[in-house]
Image: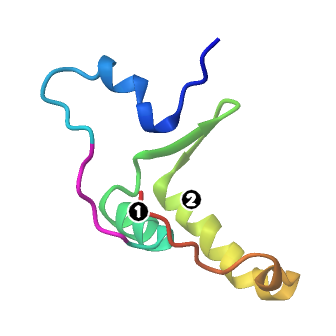
Amino acid sequence: MAEVRYMDKPWLKFYEEGVPENIPYKAICLPHILDRTAGEFPEKTALVFQGCTITFRQLQEMADRLRHVSPILAFRRVMPRQSCSPI
């Protein structure tokens, strides 16, 4: 079986006509994306896991609690407080 390389992007042939291969986006940190989304859509569903539904407001509250306790738990040495990722 031939190896499929990421650069071949075989999924593109399934895109509907007019759907671009790439879209422009701003490079902002993940916490900023969550803050903005929770501000605009606080009661919308952020995720569903094993039947439990969490809104963006709840997810932001959980993330904020983790940010506050992370220095106590010494997470700061293991992982940075903010991860910047283009999403």
Tell me the amino acid under the disc marked 2: Leu
* Image vertical order of residue 9 relative to residue 62, above or below: above
Q: Which residue is mark 1?
A: 38
Which residue is painted at 81% across and 77% down in the image? 78
Category of crowding for the residue at label 1, using alpha-carbon neighbours closer than 10 angstroms: few (below 14), some (14–19), many (at least 20): many
* Image vertical order of residue 50 relative to residue 67, above or below: above
* Mark linked to residue 59: 2
| 61 relative to 79 in the view: left or right | left
Measure the alpha-carbon separation of dots 2 and 1. Answer: 8 Å
* Image vertical order of residue 36 relative to residue 22, above or below: below
Q: Earlier in the sequence, mark 2 or mark 1?
A: 1
Tell me the amino acid under the disc marked 1: Ala
Q: Residue furthest left?
A: 18
* Mark linked to residue 4: none
Which quadrant is the N terminus positioned in? top right
Is the magenta region chiefly helix, strand or loop? Answer: loop
Residue toward you, 62 or 32: 32
**Residue 80 pos. (x, y %):** 68, 80
| 9 relative to 40 in the view: left or right | right
**Magenta region includes residue 24:** yes
Residue toward you, 63 or 1: 1
Category of crowding for the residue at label 2, using alpha-carbon neighbours closer than 10 angstroms: few (below 14), some (14–19), many (at least 20): some
Element type where label 2 sits in the image:
helix
Which residue is painted at 41% across and 57% down in the image? 87
| 16 relative to 11 in the view: left or right | left
Element type where label 1 sits in the image:
helix
Which residue is painted at 53% across and 65% down in the image? 60
Q: Which residues are magenta?
A: 22-27
Residue 21 quadrant: top left
Q: Are marks 2 and 1 in contact (CB under 8 Å)?
A: yes
